[in-house]
Amino acid sequence: MDAEREDTTTAGTAGTGTPSAFAARPDLSGVPAEPGVAKPDAIIVGDSITRQFGGLKAVDVDHIEIQRGVITALIGPNGAGKTTLFNLLTGFDVPATGAWSFNGSSLARVAPYKVARLGMVRTFQLTKVLAKLTVIENMRLGATGQRGEKFWLAAFPFLWRQQEHENTERADDLLTRFKLDEKREDFAGSLSGGQRKLLEMARALMVDPELIMLDEPMAGVNPALKQSLLGHVKSLRDEGRTVLFVEHDMDMVRDISDWVIVMAQGKIVAEGTPEAVMTNPAVIDAYLGAHHDTDLTEIDEKEIEAEAMAEIQSEIESDQKDHR
Amino acid sequence: MNATQTPVAATAPVTAKKTSRHATTSIVLGVLGLTLTVGITSPFAFLQANKALAEIDAAPGHYEGRMLAQVGRVLGVVGTVYLVVWLVLGFTVGIGGVDMVEVFRTALNQAFGPNAIVYALAAIGLNIHFGYTGLLNFGQAGFMAVGAYGLAVSVVTWGLPFWLGVVVALLAPVLLAILLGLPTLRLRADYLAIATIATAEILRLVFGAVETKDVFGGSNGLNGYVGPFQDANIFRAWDVFTTGALAFEEVDLGIVSFSKRDLWSMLVGWIVVALACLVVWALMRSPWGRVLRSIREDEEAVRSLGKNVFAYKMQSLILGGIFGGMAGLFLALKQASVVPSDYSTNMTFLAFTALLIGGAARVAGPVIGAMILWFLISGLGSFFGQATSGADPLLPSWVMDNTQASLVRFIITGLGLMLLMIFRPQGIFGDRREIAIDGR
Amino acid sequence: MRLRVITLLSVLFFLLLLQPVGAHADSTAPSPSPSAEPSPSAPLERPDGPYITVRLVDAAVDEPVVGVTLSVTAEDGTEVGSAETDAEGRIIVPIPALGSYTVALDEATLPEGIELNTNAEIVITARLNGANGGLFPIGVQEVVSVPFSDRLVTSLLSGIKFGLLVALAALGLSLIFGTTGLTNFAHGELITFGALATYVANRGLGLPVVLAGLLAVVVSAAFGWAQDRGLWRPLRRRGTGLIAMMIVSIGLSLLLRNLYQYTIGSSRKSLSQYVSQARNDYGFIKLADKEIAIMLVALVAIIVVCVVLMKTRLGKSMRAVSDNPALSASSGMQVDRVISSVWILGTALTGLSGVLLAVNSQINFLMGFKLLLLVFAGVTLGGLGTIWGALFGSMVIGIMVEVGPLFGVPSSIKEVGALVVLIIVLLVRPQGILGRRERVG
């Protein structure tokens, strides 16, 4: 019954921003702006991923690739299947069909905790801070490969105290960086919505992920904090990590993303640089819900509505599950 | 289980002016004080009423219920006076054949006696499950049963040596935890609750069945396995050593007295309880304990950080189950027989009550809780027993006869559990901020 | 003296709330005819203290019945001991103290071809310090051995009957769980409440059983409404968590169960009518009139409720709240009102289950609590919170319990089979047979 099997990942290789990783980032400028396009250096490759909620396809992605070392935004109208795709990629939900890989290793039927250990860590749309733990305890939890988390070693502090000390130092650095150091000893439940988002992001960084997936990092954050949050996300890329985020806030998408993927009705309908996507008529149609003859299949408004409901339903379900 | 309200509650219309909660509480406690609890809740009624009045006066626009609070205060005062007179008279001359000193002695005896140890161990296990990890194990009686039967069956039925029986008794709950955990730990919390309660009942029925009598002894259970345990009784050994003969008299320790057999059980039992507390304390302050508490808060978040939540839950279930097994083992040793009807669902619920009295997610919570529970249960039992027996009982038999008197303590326990959960879910020592249950 | 009056007053106040229901009715238990003096050759060892002895005799041939298990239960429900009848058809069970004890005969251990024609339980009041007891005052009848297919049909029928009774209670539990999320451990006590209310109306008020049953359903519904208003709704308003409410319901269960025992004692009671009805032979099947009536009433009640839930506005809003309380509230539904209706409907159904159980056999303070786990099993088996699931699961449980013994489940613990099935289903299909797939980690 060993909870922490040896860390099989090489999460450490992503490191904290080695210049070489920075330089190695291939340019995306030559990549054509079309759905499902291949990237020069993809960290995630997915094929024919589908997930249904009661007869409606919430996600139906033929091909998706996420470029390493850049910030990719995943946008789309409500109910487009973005969060569901997130859940599928990270193992929190199981697709009906599909295959996808991270750094070349297949992730189909891999448990969420293993996905995280591989170096692919996510945050949640409804922030999941551990309300009754202090901020610093939240942070310490994030560290991987802790000896003290093994049952047989836990009762002997001398075996893990040194490591705990190092983790705490790292956590304190991150808290300072995210300007949460003053809240160090507060219960996480007492933080504001924006501070919770920051804490969740900082905690995810404790895992030292190669790819960090942020689900609506701006939702519920007050405008004063938004600017600093944007800066934090950019700094993640600048230290060599890959960022994939879901967002509704178009300013944020325009400001910081290097590449944008647009979903509607569970499908990827457009891809490209922010500029290219913003002017793409398919995207405008997807947001306005208008019919378009070429790129989009016939959109039945009722269907979209029902699909949106299905997604809300699934969120409520998982939400209720958390309350039980 | 976080601070968010349930969707239903969130939609409840907010009335502009609401009755002060303290006022309602004080009325409830006041009425209880004059009826069921013989004045014990009255001082609290008085305090609550004062709080209510202060609250209402501070914000008259927000609260109503001034009248209610004042009634509560009067009830509280009357009840408190009643309680004081009761105690004074009861401890000096005795009232209507009720000797309060005797009631107190009985209560104290049980608060430190072997029964409290059994429930303390069971509740320590539940504390690991429920208090720290948020697992709803309603089948602790099942873990206790396999512990007790593990010993008895090994020794009596299979003829194994005593110490091997103890090993079996400690391994059986591990096995049960694994069997139970594999299917249910991946599911929602209530499934575990139903699966565990069902398993505990299955075990009790099978252990008591006629068809399995050859192995488990049927409804009369098993006995005749405690020899080595009793032989090791140092109090008797001391007698033999000093006087050259066995002496069986009660040992008088001031107000309480115990038989040498109980004393030996208690010595062993309290040492085990202390060690159990030490283990829980050491584990829960470690990163391992931090993972458990995090799982209690939000297991998805923990999963997203790369922790194998299932494995941790399983470890928690096993560890708590072992303490449950120890409780059963100790019960088997102290009463020298294993009877299936002991391991009913009620036992689990009483252990939960003990845990909640003391406070979940506190190392000493279950121990203090078990002592208080037994103090109250046996005190009330003794009081009502005395009040309904004798030639001229305090309570005439048309109000309450001797059989009914034995039920009053459980009626009060049920009521107490409800009130505790509603008004003080953190128990006596719990930190309100750190419990799985969100009382607010 | 004054103090004593206060105590009395306070206790009285409490009892008035309780409505003492024929307390001490159990003292009417048959007084034991002293046993015949033990013959010198008596093989059984006689204990020093008080004990109960029972002799089992086949009335048809006036011969002792050997090897039958009888168990003795004290008034508080704890089992004192059990024994098998010896060559003289006698058992001896020592008892800890004088008082009333129930002696129950395990019908499964009766020899092949012998069947009881009345109740398998008697109450004995132990008054002597030595032997207490006498002949087991029940007749034992010789019957021809029955072929397997007939036994299967009989078991299936009892299973269906039992399943319907469980289904009524399960429907109530499922409705309440669905709308409020409350896992109500006091649900068994609602079953007992229905049975007790019938008993009071029948024996206390002298109403005929049918009227008493109707009244009991109404009172049960009122009890449910009051419980929601007085306890659960305030808790919901306070935002009390679901687990906290579950534990409150455990406390309530303990409270109610002991109050029931306080008022009616621990012995079993019978109604004034339809107590022992002979079974009519319908060729292939044998059923007593009351059994047919019970099944019909249960079936009609279930159908009516299902129609109500499917067709009426109230039913639709109940299902809507059950599916998604937040959404229903935001679309202008009065959630509290719907929940009140659900409590009324749910407890009425559960009360009806208790009424029918009372008519079917007997009334006891533990009857609902004993059934609770099977009700839970039915609900979980079908899928938590779904109505069809609760019905289906309950039928499976009912039939499992009754048919199991034919396929090797020890009949003294026939509930075990159903509970094992529950755990296996959780293993294979955790969402229940008809449940929606939950996302599982």
Image: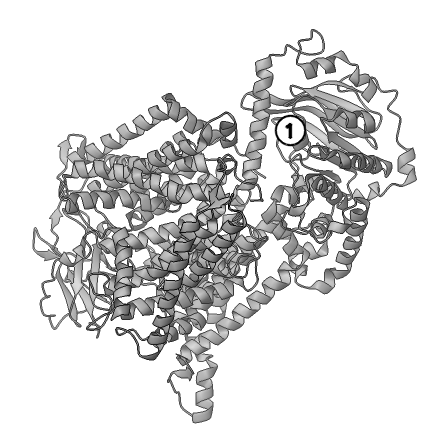
Residue A201 locus on image (x, y percent)? 74, 41
Q: Nearer the viewer, residue B281 or B181?
A: B281
Against B312, residue B218 (above or below) is below
What residue is drawn where x is 55% and y is 44%?
B1
Q: Is residue B310 visible?
A: no
Q: Nearer the viewer, residue A106 or B91?
A: B91
Helix, strand or loop at mark 1? helix
Residue tagged 1: A84
Q: Nearer the viewer, residue A253 or B336?
A: A253
Q: Chain of mark 1?
A: A
**In-image side of C282 versus B197 (left or right):** left
Residue A145 locus on image (x, y percent)? 73, 51
Q: Quadrant of residue C275?
A: top left
Q: Residue furthest top?
A: A293
Q: Quadrant of residue A309?
A: top right
Q: Is residue A184 visible?
A: yes
Q: Residues within 10 Å of mark 1 (few under 14, many from 20)?
A: many
Q: Quadrant of residue C180?
A: top left
Q: Nearer the viewer, residue C63 or A304?
A: A304
Q: How many numbered discs, if any?
A: 1
Against B49, residue C116 (above or below) is above
Residue B379 locus on image (x, y percent)? 37, 69
The residue under label 1 is which amino acid type? Answer: Thr
**In-image side of B431 versus B204 (left or right):** right
Against C323, residue A158 (above or below) is below
